[in-house]
Amino acid sequence: MRIIFMGTPRFAVPSLRAIAEADSDFEIVLVVTGKDKPRRNQRSEPEPTPVKKAAKELGLTVLEIDDVKEPRFADTVARHRPDVIVVAAFRILPPSVFEQARLGSFNLHASLLPRYRGAAPVNWTIINGDTETGVTTFFLRKTVDTGNILLQERTPVGPDETAGELAERLSVIGAGAVVKTLELIRDGKAEPLAQDDAGATKAPKLTSENTRIDWTEPVDAICDFVRGLSPKPSAWTVFNHRKVKIYKAVPADFQLPEPEEQAKVPGSLSVEGGRMFVMGLDGWVEILSLQMEGKRRMEAVEFCCGFRCEEECPSFS
């Protein structure tokens, strides 16, 4: 079976390796990924994508691409005569590309479709407080994330699991699902199942607007929001007119004396005994890890050492 693999980030690497190490019937004839570019910051040297690094280690042929709609790209794919195209965390392919695969093209998606169609399924799974998630392989079609389902694998979401940790686990679970899907297609045993559009939910791209913390939300929702965006792109708020990234927060069994407590509003900040608390709608959130604009990431206890409530605005917004 001739396979073209398309992917870019770390999430896709376990799937590439799993195919390469699986049945000898699977021949990866081409790996398609993004072009080298600065990946730590704009001033750093251009670096290969994680998928390109892994492909080179495996001795595979790599094609770097910027524009998947460029007609020459579809021609290149066609020349490699793929039986199957496997896509994992890549770009939206036009039909002129994914229809080149003789037996079909499928995508690995980090949710239980039709739940969380879109760019950030892992993040929104945790933000919304889901206790179960998984991965889905499905045949590509023109409308994004709507193709017929080939295989799903389920897993619980840990109560303290961050988006980064969950994505790492799902990448490994997904690698197994990709190989199983290839085996089903090879053996003629695939039974694609149409998605129920009535159960579809969205996982939109993360932006500066939808990653800002709303302190008027309940405490549990705030903590889910923080871990659902940790470590990247991270939830954020404003303190003393400066942006602050919050990486870890937990519900707090904390209460001020009653007259003070009643006077506080969501976003109010209190530093007590080297610990940092912020009021939400129905209680207090303890901040454990944060990064002030222009500073390095630090534990809250470090921040508290230099904090003087009487000199600084005691609230987040």
Image: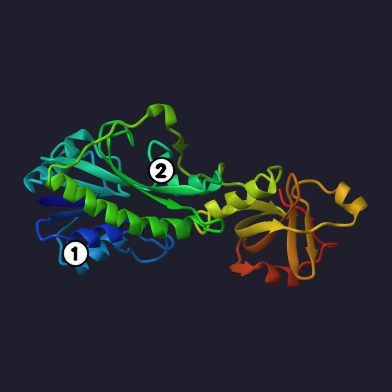
Q: In the rendered view, does 190 fall on the left or right side of 25?
A: right
Where residue 234 sits: x, y (%)?
54, 54
Label 1 environment density (alpha carbons within 10 Å; few <14, some 14–19, many ≥20): few
The kind of secondary structure element at disc 2 is loop
Where residue 28 sits: x, y (%)?
14, 56
Where residue 163 sits: x, y (%)?
49, 55
Residue under the image location 19 percent in, 55 percent down: 31
Q: CA distance from mark 1 to mark 2?
A: 28 Å
> Disc 2 marks which amino acid?
Ala
> Disc 1 marks which amino acid?
Glu
Residue under the image location 80 percent in, 46 percent down: 265
Q: In the rendered view, does 90 fall on the left or right side of 251?
A: left
Q: Residue under label 1, please give it.
A: 21
Front-most of residues 177 and 8: 177
The single residue placed furthest to the top in the displayed view is 198
Q: Residue under label 2, please give it.
A: 119
- Which is more foreground, mark 1 or mark 2? 1
The image's mark for residue 40 is: none
Front-most of residues 35 and 164: 164
